[in-house]
Every structure is written in structure tokens, then in C-alpha cells.
Image (cartoon, helix red, strand yellow):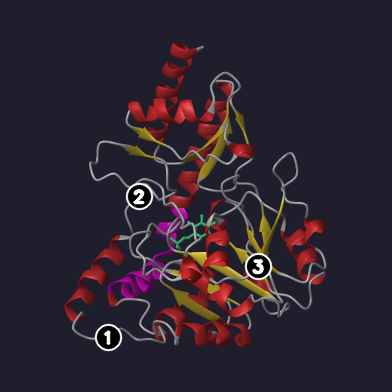
Amino acid sequence: MSRFFSSRLSSLTPYTPGEQPKDAQYIKLNTNESPFPPSPLAVAKASEAAKQLNLYPDPTCSQLCEVFASQKGIAKDEVIFGNGSDEILFYAFQAFCDENTPALFADITYGFYEVFAQLCQVPYEKIPLRDDFSIAPEDYFGQKKTIFLANPNAPTGMILQKSEIEKILQNNPENIVVVDEAYIDFGGESCCDLIARYDNLLVVQTFSKSRSMAGARLGMGMANRALIADLNTVKYSTNPYNINKMTMAAGIATMQDESYTQKNCQTIIENRAFTVAELNRLGFFVLPSKTNFVFAAHDKIDGATLYQKLKEKNILVRHFTNARIANFNRITIGTKEQMQALICAISQILEETT
Ligand SMILES: *Cc1c(COP(=O)(O)O)cnc(C)c1O
């Protein structure tokens, strides 16, 4: 830290992204990216858009909003796009949290919530998940805080039923509930259609996982128009041109090639079932997943050791040091071949170490 760094930020612990090694030798199952390339139509449209990089992009993302809204059955002014859904979450912390309205989230959830709370200097509180790592909805009733729920949750992969989310919304009429649906396309039911009925609901989604666009940075928030207007106030006070031309074109094309996304999601769901069955066969405890990753632990090998031994075999998974989940690894679901290689490597490691 330099002596010039703002004292406001001196105690901030930034988010630690998963490793992104430069050498391509690893089977990368550590950051929940899609193993499939983006839609060919998206690639073509992005490269076409690159010819106009001398011009600023449309700050209103008008065409993208139109295509997206019509597909989701919402109005054009009920959606806002961000440079990744992380940006939308950051807007939400700025727009809807303050000294009187702290943030509230689970003890085990997406790490960025705590980072954003610290960066925005708003108070926050964490509610422990149940012993089985599920969320107890009633813990969130009438808390008078801005609630951030990853649904399905990360890194557990577990989902809270839509009816339970609805109870949380009903029991917090004076507070915002942000439902982060980064993984909703892998078998969950979205709360998107609840935005017409609950004026305190903000649903956040991303193109990073199911739509194979992590490298393009595109995410969105959906809510009633008053909330979207608040988020736009933050956006236009920071970076009105937050979505670049290539990403915008790729996003529109991806929405127009929905069957490509659906086919890939279906493949991931099948590969997930294969992976869970194989991990169970090898003696792993695997949490029920509705995402493109599984969270797994074994009583014969601790989480950190397994992570390290897989890395030595050129397979990257994600290990978290948080005591409650230190025995687990989060494993992204890749292609069938990648998952077969993973299972093969884990079998060898178990034989060598147990
Ligand atoms: C991956 C992820 C995001 C962020 O995705 P972006 O790439 O910024 O769109 C947000 N929330 C959760 C829970 C995630 O896992």
C-alpha cells in the first residue's frame, strides 16, 4: 500500500478471482466458465461490430434491451445491462444500501457481496446457512436490510424454491431483495416473472455462465422501472458506456440464438449427473446442484490436498479456505471428456493417498 492510498479503503480486502493460468495445459474447472465457445452468430456479429470501434457504444443499450425484454416478457425499461453482473451488483450496493439499510447475506455465498459492502462502506451482516448448507428463508424475514441471495447459491450449488423466495419478498415489503441468478439456466426456476408483482425485487443474471460469454463481460438486472431508474442513476454517474460495441453485438446475437444456449445447458446438466454419480461412487459427499458446478467433499482426503494433487495432474478446481467449507472443492462441469479425465485423476489420487 502506498502512503497515498485513501484511508477509507485501507482495510479493504479485494475479491480473489479463480486462477487464470496463461499456459493452456490445464483442464480448467475452477471458475464456472462454459467449456463451449460462444454462439457462432455472436462471434460473427462481434467481429463486425469491431469495425466501428472508433465510435462510442449506445449508452442506453436500446437494441439489446429490446431483444432481451421481449424474450423475457418484460418491458424495455425493466432491464439494465452491466459490465458483467458484478457491475449490476455493485450498482445495487450503491443504490440500495446505506448506514440505515445494511446489507444482509449468507455466511457462505458469493464472495463479492462482502467486498462490495466494504467498498461502499455500508454495514453488513451474515446469516449462517443451516448445517446442511441450505438457506433458512425465515432467517431473512423482517430484517430491515437489503438482502442479497445467490439463487442457486455459490459455491454450494443449492437452490431455494421460488415459493420460498416469494415468502422472503412478502416478509420484507420495505426492503430490496436482490436475487442473483447467475446459474439459473442449469435447471432452476427464475424469479424474473415476479418483478411485476414485487416492487422490492431485483433479479440479476449474467451471460458469463450459460451463454458462454464470460470474456465479453455482460450481465443484467431486471426489476420494476423505478428500481431500474435508480440503477441507471448510478450507471450514468460512473460509466454510461459500460457495454462495449462488440459485447453488445454478441449479446444481441446470443439472445437470437437461444437454441444454442439451451442445447449447451442441457449437455452441462447431463454431464453434471454423470459427474455426481461418479463422485458418489468414489465415496464423495456431493451437495445437490442446480448449477454448472458441484461442491464435493471426501472424508479420506482433505479439500486442500485434493485441490493440490489435482493441480499437479493439470486439473484446476476451486478450493476455499473458509473453515466451514475447507474440506470441499468446487468443481465446474465441463465437457464429458473433461469430466472423465477428472474422475480418472481423482481415482488415482485416492488410490495413492488412502
Ligand atoms: C459468476 C457469478 C457472478 C458474476 O458474473 P459476471 O461474470 O460478473 O457476470 C455473479 N454472481 C454469482 C453468484 C456468480 O457465481
Q: Nearer the viewer, mark 2 or mark 1?
A: 1
User: Is residue 261 rendered magenta in the image?
Assistant: yes
Disc 2 CB within 8 Å of nearest ligand 1 atom: no
In percent of width and height, residue 35 lies at 37, 46
- Asked if residue 239 lies left or right of residue 194, the reply is left
Q: Check contact, mark 2 vs mark 1: CB within 8 A.
A: no
Kind of residue at disc 1: Tyr
Compare residues 31 and 303 and report the one nearer the observer.
303
Badge 1: residue crowd in 10 Å (few <14, some 14–19, many ≥20): few
Q: Which mark is residue 123?
A: 3
Q: Report the predominant secondary structure element of the magenta stretch.
A: helix
Alpha carbon distance from label 1 to label 3: 37 Å
Q: Quadrant of the N terminus?
A: bottom left
Compare residues 137 and 37 and report the one nearer the observer.
137
Q: Nearer the viewer, mark 3 or mark 2?
A: 3
* Residue position marked by numbered label 2 in the rendering: 36
Identity of the residue drawn at 41% across and 68% down: 218
Alpha carbon distance from label 2 to label 1: 30 Å
Q: Secondary structure at mark 2?
A: loop
First reached walking from the N terminus: tag 1 or tag 3: 1
Most extreme residue toward the front is: 3
In percent of width and height, residue 88 lies at 51, 72
The quarter holding residue 345 reads top left
Q: Check contact, mark 1 vs mark 3: CB within 8 A.
A: no
Residue interval drawn in magenta:
246-263
Q: Secondary structure at mark 1?
A: loop
In percent of width and height, residue 22 lies at 24, 45
Kind of residue at disc 3: Pro
User: Is residue 232 rendered magenta in the image?
Assistant: no
**Vertical placement of 301 versus 204: above or below?**
above
Q: Secondary structure at mark 3?
A: loop
